[in-house]
Amino acid sequence: MSPHISRRARITGVSLAAAGALIAAAVTAGTAGASPTAPSGTSTAASSVTAASPVKMTASHRAELLRDASATKAQTAQQLGLGAQEKLVVKDVVKDADGTTHTRYDRTFAGLPVLGGDLIVHRAKDGAVKSTTKANSAKIAVASTTPKVAPKAAAQAAQGTAKSFGAKQAAAVTPKKVVWAASGKPVLAYDTVVGGFQKDGTPNQLHVITDADTGKKLFQYQGIENGAGTSAYSGAVEIGSKKGADGYELTDDQRGGHSTFNLNGSQSGEGKLFTNKDDKWGNGKADDPATAAVDAAYGAQLTWDYYKTVHGRAGIKGDGKGATSRVHYGQNYSNAFWDDSCFCMTYGDGEGNKKPLTSIDVAAHEMSHGVTSATANLTYSGESGGLNEATSDIFGTSVEFFAKNKEDAGDYLIGEKIDIAGDGKPLRYMDKPSKDGQSLDSWTPEAGNVDVHYSSGIANHFFYLLSEGSGAKEIGGVKYDSPTADGKKVEGIGRDKAEKIWFKALTTYMTSNTDYKGAREATVKAATDLFGKDSAEVKGVEAAWTGVAVK
């Protein structure tokens, strides 16, 4: 594997909500192995490593822990007092420096997937169960697994729902029987996925949950995760490639085999792997297809480096395997998206096919959707959807600081380089989200009914307050002025600690249906684990949540 230099690589990423498109989540940028630049009040990485910090596991070590958990899952189910028809399915495991393990399980009932039945078992080094975190504490059981509503009727209803949201070519796959336990008493239900495309050309994977006895729609959420990105000039960068049969291939074997493909305007398929003869990629302009590939590969490698260096996670799933990037999706497509089914990031070329959405923020944001999917799997709707979006913004921002790219310095602005609305303004502001005209600064009872791109403002604001504190200040040449819901001053604990707290909360305490109150509880637990019960960090977490009216 040899390093490759792109010349000046121009990148543009999008995350549109206010501008009329809901851009799909994005990837990361930075310099491989670079350490973050500390803003005001930010500690060094070493100072925040504690007994509760996640250890850096190799893929083989993680696989061993997963095998052990799988071998004892029946015993674990018995320890937890689960019913005879309930089975556990091991999904993920995180190990702390003191030997504590946090094993995440999905659940089945009578062989059917239980949506909202996920749980996390926290075990001490000696194997004793310390505590359990459940998405739903209700007893998982249904009277019968024989539906009264025909699958065809559920499929037709799901198609109607999708079309009402403007989906094109909305074809429904065969409904799958599930137990719906994400809210209230568990019921037998159908999970129907409707394909086709959304209004802006993004692939559609709308999940429609219907009661299998009454046909009533219970819930819906989008499988393709949309978010916000940023456009930047990354300059000359090193990217990973390898020698192939006829020259060089854009595959990074040092980062799990991440590969970059050219869709060349198509909206389906894997595309064609980027290759060339001389191992020089892109000319810094959109007229060379390889320029977007350079930026996508650069973003992917730096996201990988961030999660491995800062959080000890080897790849999106923690299994050491790289994702895939696809560039040049569709025509005039001003969006980018993460698709868990292909484990890939996909980027459009923007208006006039002149502004590929392959920037640092966009890349980091996208891959972070994959991390969320592999861990808490926050449902992409309601308050959990807002937390899902905010998680990608939080880590997209963290990666941007980590990258230390002189041409796109870290900041608390989302999409500041894109100018998608033509007014020179960022898409989102973490210090005061409402400056974009639609995002929420703080929690309200209606937060769950707000588009996830705007309800994410609550957690984005929390993260800024936790990192930097309230009030007017200038950080890295950017001026901020962050208010609080109650007008009280909040002191920041530093971004380094804040991002570690959010990562630990996401991977060890949040579940699929965590809401904002649950996020407060999860981050307080994470801060307590990392820094102690009466620490300044715990008090900082509590104050920052109070600052956005989450109590």
Image: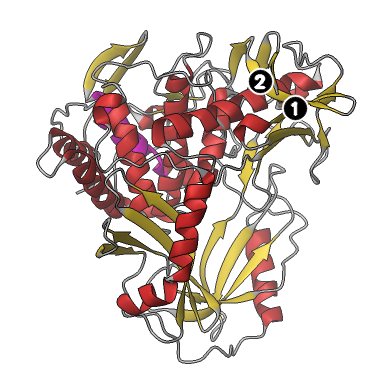
Towards the viewer: 386 or 7: 7
Residue type marked 2:
Ile
Q: Nearer the viewer, residue 197 or 388?
A: 388
Q: Which residues are magenta?
A: 455-468
**From this viewpoint, is residue 381 visible?**
no
Label 1 sits on a secondary structure element that is loop
Check if residue 418 falls in the magenta segment. Answer: no
Residue situated in front as seen by the camera: 410 or 273: 273
Residue 236, image quadrant: top right
Q: Which residue is mark 1?
A: 250
Residue indicated by mark 2: 239
Q: Residue 24 got which mark? A: none
Mark 1 and mark 2 in contact? Answer it, CB < 8 Å. yes
Can you say which quadrant of the picture contains the N terminus?
Answer: top right
Q: Residue at x 32, y 46 (%)?
A: 96
Q: Residues within 10 Å of mark 2 (few under 14, many from 20)?
A: many
Q: Position of residue 468 (x, y in %)?
A: 26, 23
Q: Please, what secondary structure does the residue beneath circle 2 have?
A: strand
Q: Position of residue 200 (x, y in %)?
A: 69, 42
Residues under labels 1 and 2: Cα distance? 8 Å
> In the picture provided, is 234 more to the left or to the right than 137?
right
Specify which label sits upstream in the sequence, 1 or 2. 2
Left of 450 or right of it: where is 357? right
- The prevailing secondary structure element of the residues shown in magenta is helix
